[in-house]
Image: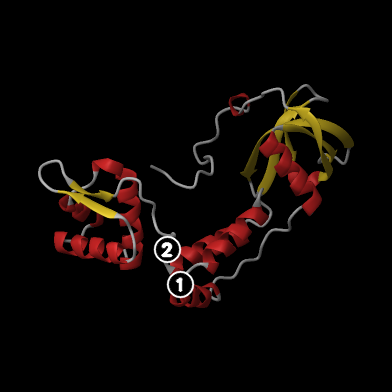
Amino acid sequence: MKRAERLHALSEMLRRSGSRGCSAERLAREFAVSVRTVKRDLAALERSGAPIGSRPGPGGGYGMALGATLPPVSLSPSQAVALMAAVSAASDAPYADLAAAGVRKIVDVLDPRTRARADALADRVWVDAHPAPSRAVRSALEEAMADQRVVRIRYTSGEGAETTRDVEPVLFAFTSGRWYLVGWCRLRDAMRWFTVSRIERASVTSTPCAGHTVLEVGEPPATAAPVHGSRS
């Protein structure tokens, strides 16, 4: 692990530990470095403005000072490019536009040297993105999912049959190279999977969803998981 990445991981570990704190020895074991190196890293974080505090004696250790906030997130060039690549490769994903805007905000606040290195590395990562559904359709589906309101869709099945349906959105799912809207179809009175690319039109209604849950869809396969941004 490079030092910039270790400093970021170290600050995150201290933040998660809260008032309990972590000893220098534990931090050294966690990052496979010497205690001396850990103390140098802690000093570097303090100089950068991180609110590092310490408690001496048994049960003491290093942590974030109570009531303090962390300085702005700092990414390594590789981490910044990883975010750019992930968003670019998933241009057809739900909320992809918002994700791209979020990544731009993060990159814009990087220090000039890191940003320059990230830009240079980004030139070495090419993405042939999937074609995205229309912006109007995507916006309606995203809004209906976030607000849990019924969405009215014009849908063409794999056999070419066109229907208009009112759907209670339950989840978005990506499998076999396609995005699906999974929801309770009021026309069929059952849970259905709709290929997003086959939804020709979509409009959000004022009708709230009845409360169908992800559990009604079933258990995801072992290779699938919700897209939480972190694992603890």
Q: Is residue 206 left or right of residue 47?
A: right
Q: Residue at x 73, y 38 (%)?
A: 144
Q: Look at mark 2 in the image and give the residue it sits on.
A: 74
| Quarter of the image where the C terminus is located | top left
The amino acid beneath tag 2 is: Ser
**Residue 180 - label:** none
Q: Position of residue 213 (x, y in %)?
A: 62, 26
How far apart are labels 2 and 1 at the CA level? 8 Å
**Nearer-N-terminus badge (2/1):** 2
Residue 91, image x, y percentages = 66, 57
Question: Residue 35 vs residue 221: left or right?
Answer: left
Q: Residue furthest left?
A: 57
Tell me the SS state at disc 2: loop
Q: Is residue 110 above or below residue 163?
A: below
What amino acid is found at the position of numbered circle 1 in the picture? Asp
User: In the rendered image, is residue 5 in sight?
Assistant: yes
**Residue shown at 69%/32% (left/top)?**
148
| Residue 2 seen in this snapshot | no
Q: Is residue 65 left or right of residue 132?
A: left
Numbered circle sitting on residue 111: 1
Q: Nearer the viewer, residue 177 or 11?
A: 11
Callout 2–callout 1 Cβ contact below 8 Å: yes
Residue 205 sits in quarter: top right
Packing grade of label 1 (10 A; few <14, some 14-19, many >=20) is: few
